Image: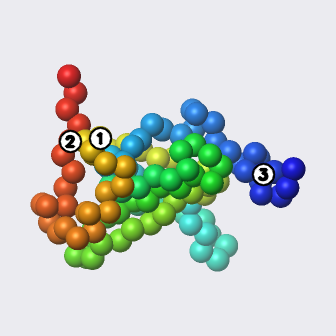
Amino acid sequence: MNLVEEYAKKHAKTGDDIPKFNVGDTVRVHYRIVEGEKERVQIFEGIVIARAGAESPEATFTVRRIANKEGVERVFPLHSPRIEKVEVAREGAARRAKLYYLRDRVGKAARVKPKHRT
């Protein structure tokens, strides 16, 4: 077993640690940040515009939000030990796997319709 596989096996999160969220959902990612010798948790809230790698050790998801009238995207490794938790704030109805078209939209046009529960 090589070093990458060993690391992935050690830090892999189980199904209980990973909430079920899809592309189009609005999530809050609680991410641990190290500044010098201090550690703090920063919350990054936005729409999931992409997921890659399913549940594999290399899996990632991209979250986009608008901050100061500027679009900000951040790619998070799903199994990162720095991710405290991922909360699903709102489920969105997406009809495609990647929502890259949201990059060209501003304001109300950049919203994703909520998922209807029946």
Report how far apart the C-alphas of labels 3 and 2 lie in the structure: 38 Å
The kind of secondary structure element at disc 3 is helix
Q: Earlier in the sequence, mark 1 or mark 3?
A: 3
Colour setup of the view: rainbow
Q: Is residue 93 left or right of residue 86?
A: left
Label 3: which residue? 5
- The amino acid at mark 2 is Pro
Q: Is residue 44 above or below residue 8?
A: below
Report how far apart the C-alphas of labels 1 and 3 lie in the structure: 33 Å
The reply to whether discs 1 and 2 touch (Cβ–Cβ < 8 Å) is yes
Q: Can you tell which quarter of the image residue 98 is in?
A: bottom left
Label 1: which residue? 91
Q: Where residue 59 sits: x, y (%)?
A: 57, 52
Which residue occupies the foreground of this view, 56 or 72?
A: 56
Residue that appears at 28% across and 68% down: 103
Report how far apart the C-alphas of labels 1 and 2 lie in the structure: 6 Å
Q: Earlier in the sequence, mark 3 or mark 2?
A: 3
Q: Is residue 100 left or right of residue 81?
A: left
Q: Residue furthest top?
A: 118
Label 2: which residue? 114
- The amino acid at mark 1 is Glu
Residue that appears at 39% across and 43% down: 22
The kind of secondary structure element at disc 2 is loop
